[in-house]
Amino acid sequence: MGELHIYDDELYYHSSKEGGKGGTDIWMLTNIDGKWQNPVNVEAVNSEVDDGYPFITADGQEMWINRWYMGTPAVFRSKWADARGRHICRREKIAYSKFSCGGNSSSGGRIFSS
């Protein structure tokens, strides 16, 4: 199991467990009445290569993940389809590519790296 990210009553992580699209995939568990449910593959953001390090924005409207793209690491962003953030409307849009260091985004959507 990879890095965990908790948002509200949902826990996101990456894993190479069976049932994925290939490599590592993003998975989600939901807490209902104090009990964690079985993991569900977040198919809309996963690809045939390694997808990992899920991050949900503070407003809960986007998921950011890492994936290799054209031989380099890249950050992909997906927007939620509904206000509660239960379903992803569409797979990625590249947010940042060809970097060698970490990046952060501002509330205005700008990406900073050091």
Image: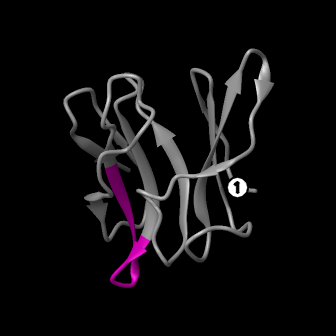
Q: Give residue 105's position: percent from left, percent from top.
A: 32, 38
Residue reaching furthest to the top: 33
Determine whether 73 is above or below 64 in the image: below
Q: Quadrant of residue 37?
A: top right
Query: Could you say whether the residue bearing mark 1 is in a helix, strand or loop?
Result: loop
Residue 69 counted in the magenta span: yes
Q: Quadrant of residue 23?
A: bottom right
Is residue 19 rendered to the left or right of residue 65?
Answer: right
Segment tinted magenta in the rendering: 68-77
Viewer-closest of 98 and 31? 31
Q: Give residue 92's position: percent from left, percent from top.
A: 31, 58
Residue reaching furthest to the bottom: 71
At label 1, the amino acid type is Gly
Q: Main secondary structure of the magenta part?
A: strand
Residue 12 counted in the magenta span: no
User: Which quadrant is the N terminus positioned in?
Assistant: bottom right
Q: Give residue 71's position: percent from left, percent from top.
A: 39, 84
Residue drawn at (32%, 71%) of the image: 98
Q: Give residue 12's position: percent from left, percent from top.
A: 61, 42
Disc 1: which residue:
2
The reply to whether residue 104 is visible in this rendering is yes
Residue drawn at (58%, 63%) of the image: 25
Residue drawn at (33%, 83%) of the image: 70
Colour setting: one colour
Residue drawn at (45%, 67%) of the image: 67
Viewer-closest of 21 and 95? 21
The reply to whether residue 102 is visible in this rendering is no
